[in-house]
Each structure stands twice: as C-alpha cells, then as structure tokens.
Amino acid sequence: MFFGAALIFVVVLALGALAMLRPRAIASLGPKRTILWGGLIVPSLILTMLVIAAFALGERLLAAPRPDMPLRIEVTARQWVWDFRYPDGSVTSGHVRMPAGEDVDFVLESADVIHGFWIPRLGGKLDAIPGHRNVIRLRADRPGTYGGVCAEYCGSGHAVMPFTVEALPRAEFDALSSGLAEARR
Ligand SMILES: [Cu+2]
C-alpha cells in the first residue's frame, strides 16, 4: 500500500508539473478522456485492489476455526489491569507470555466496562466487552518483549493499564508453563 501510494503520488505530481510546464500536452487529452480515466477507471481499479487487500488482511485477524487450533489465552480486562489465563490454568496479571513464530488466539472478555486490547507491533486491536467473548488471532514473528495498551478509554486508571508481552521460543514457553503447573500442585 505504501509503495502503491508513493507511485500514485509521483504520477499526480508529474501530471501537475506537466500541466504547468506543457499545458498543451495535457489539454490535448481532452476533458472527457481525462474524467473517464482519471475520475472513473483508474480510481475504480485502485479501490478494487484496496478492498481485496483489506478483506484478505482483515480475514487473518479473525480467529476462524481450523484443524490445528492455535494456543488460546483467555484475557480478562478489568479496571485497571489485564489478567491472562493459560491452558494449564495459570494466570498472570499485567504481563503475558506467548510462543513466538506461531498464531495465538486471545479470547477477550471484560469484568466491568469496555476496554480495548491492543499490541500495536503485533496487529490490530479489538474491544474487550462485558458479557461477550471476542477473539483476536495474533502472531509474534520473533521472540522479544512488546508493549500492549488499553485502547478504549475506561476510567481514571486508563493511562496506567499498559501490559507487557513476552514472546518466547516455543520450548522456553512450554518449560515455563509446565514449571508453573508443577509449582501449583
Ligand atoms: Cu481499559
């Protein structure tokens, strides 16, 4: 999209320069042809491509069922902290760990008001709504620490509601999970 937009920008600037420096060349195109191509055909093609790209990219955020369902982490937002519950039953607050290099489904719920779950470097955001389960599928390509925020104003503690995301290699993630499960027994 960036390179496409850059290309269109350059073409429009070139046409603008041409109109000032060589007005006859532009005038020779004729008003009808200019409107037909510049106002209808080219914009329709560009918008069609953008719509297709938006649908394809948006689809990847939806947690559609598939044979190898990704890891599910249950997220509960409340004023003003995020709780994360893992398949082994352990819970962390204000901090979530996830395996890197694979999809993870975050199942979002809220205990009070509407909050917004957003890890900007990993993808789009989705609201956590009381009495409703929203699922967002995200992936951290590389291990590392990422910042997450509440993206929906939710009261006086909204600003102090950020959380950290720790993406770990799968083996480390598993070792930590079984260690925690062991410790609770
Ligand atoms: Cu919030």
Image (cartoon, rainbow, N blue to C red):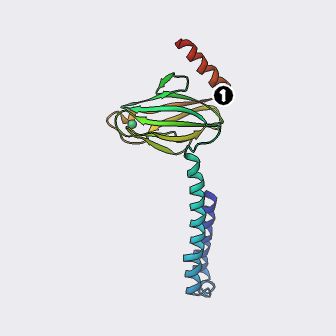
Tell me the residue at 61%/87% (across/down): 24
Image quadrant occupied by the N terminus: bottom right
Q: Where 112 falls versus 88 (above or below)?
A: below
In-front residue for pair 26/175: 175
Of all residues, the one furthest to the front in this rendering is 67
**Is 89 situated left or right of 115 in this image?**
right
The residue type indicated by label 1 comes to Arg
Residue 108, given in percent of the width and then of the height, sits at 46, 37
Tell me the residue at 59%/78% (across/down): 37
In-front residue for pair 57/28: 57
In-front residue for pair 81/30: 81
Q: Where 156 falls versus 5 (above or below)?
A: above
Of all residues, the one furthest to the left in this rendering is 156
**Is 24 situated left or right of 159 in this image?**
right
Q: Is mark 1 within 8 Å of ligand 1?
A: no
Q: How many marks?
A: 1
Task: Kindly indicate the quadrant of the structure image that contains residue 109.
Answer: top left
Q: Where 66 falls versus 169 (above or below)?
A: below
Q: Which residue is mark 1?
A: 170
**Is 27 situated left or right of 81 in this image?**
right
Tell me the residue at 49%/31% (across/down): 74
Residue 177, given in percent of the width and then of the height, sits at 59, 21
Q: Where 28 falls versus 9 (above or below)?
A: below
Q: Mark 1 Cα within 10 Å, few/some/many (few <14, many 20+)?
A: some
Residue 13, given in percent of the width and then of the height, sits at 59, 70
The quadrant where ligand 1 appears is top left
Tell me the residue at 54%/46% (across/down): 62
Residue 63, given in percent of the width and then of the height, sits at 55, 43
Secondary-structure class at tag 1: helix
In-front residue for pair 132/3: 132
Task: Kindly indicate the quadrant of the structure image that contains residue 144.
Answer: top right
**Is 80 situated left or right of 42 in this image?**
left
